[in-house]
Image: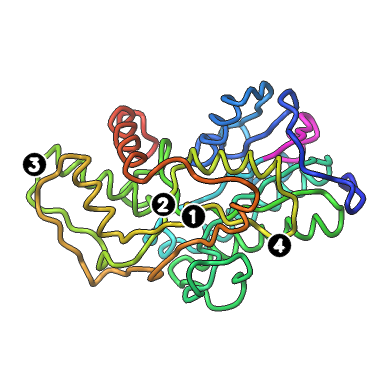
Amino acid sequence: MGSVIDEGAFAPRRLDRHATFFVAGHRGLAGSAVVRRLEAEGFDRILTRASSDLDLTERGDVFRFFRTHRPRYVVLAAAKVGGILANSTYPVDFLSVNLRIQSNVMDAACETGVERLVFLGSSCIYPKFAPQPLREDSLLTGHLEPTNDAYAIAKIAGILNVQAVRRQYGLPWISVMPTNLYGPNDNFSPLGSHVLPALIRRYDEAAAAGSPLVTNWGSGTPRREFMHADDLASAIVHLMEHYDGASHVNIGTGQDTTIREVAEQIAHITGYHGETRWDTTKPDGTPQKLLDISLLRSTGWAPSVGLRGGLARTVAWYRRSHAELRAA
């Protein structure tokens, strides 16, 4: 199983633009951004499959797919994701589905000797009260945020899976930990969305309806770091060509803001002029999540999409695409 590479024999280098490149989860926020980036950089054998054509939780189907197509590169962006409400309501689903997807894809990729695989985790892997900004070595040093601990455990298992493959088979796979993402193809559903797309939908609908009041969950005081998905995709391709190490790599902007401040920006961009109230009976989640991106910056990468401009682009995309949204 797997194609063993001698320790120290691999060095990051420019990816072959003509090699088969499988993006798992290409319809999602992160995966679709990766596909856009690959297309812009001239990759001409990008392999994708909708879940209706390839169910990544079905182990036999995944192995047959890899044996048939034998991709050289893989980005594993497929996952069951959601916000505080979804994670709190369906923890078994978030644990079971994500573990199956990860194990199936990585085992099949290992068997067929995939050269470079990038696993996408989530910043919720870090302990709830880990020192800020969050460093890669804070992993497994404390208790997780209980509202999404099942999802976090699945993602931690994915990181350890990558590290195990590196140790046992020598394959130069890596893991990345994106901060809170936003952009085209996000999930804007009322029950399944993360905080930023939920705010965009809420304020856009309120602006269109002329509603006098918008009520948001929590106090608005938690601090969050937000990154446009196009920056994530840029960082992933960069790391595939410039980084090989056992440690996962934080991907973020290095700057955070309060949920209240983000809500104010979205209200302004959508043209909402009514009142905003905060329901403090609802949970806030982790008080702050800001990633230390020193390791990422040491590879020569930096973000390029500012929050205000990225929000404006996302609101414009949401309005154009509203009728086609999977969660509308």
For marks 2 and 3, the one nearer the N-term is 3
Residue 126 placement, left or right of 74: left
Instruction: Count up the numbered dots.
Output: 4
> What number is the disc on residue 179?
1
Residue that badge 3 annotates: 210
Depth-wise, is mark 3 or mark 1 nearer the camera? 1
Mark 1 belongs to which amino acid? Thr
Q: Is residue 64 left or right of residue 169?
A: left
- Mark 1–mark 2 CB contact (< 8 Å): yes
Q: Amino acid at mark 2?
A: Phe
Q: Secondary structure at mark 2?
A: strand
Extent of the magenta region: 62-74
The residue indicated by pointer 4 is 160
Q: Position of residue 57 (x, y in %)?
A: 63, 47
Of the residues shown, which amino acid type is indicated by label 4?
Leu
Which residue is denoted by mark 2 in the rendering? 226
Answer whether labels 1 and 4 touch (C-beta < 8 Å): no
Examine the rendered structure and indicate whether residue 89 appears above or below residue 204.
below
Q: Position of residue 235 (x, y in %)?
A: 58, 43
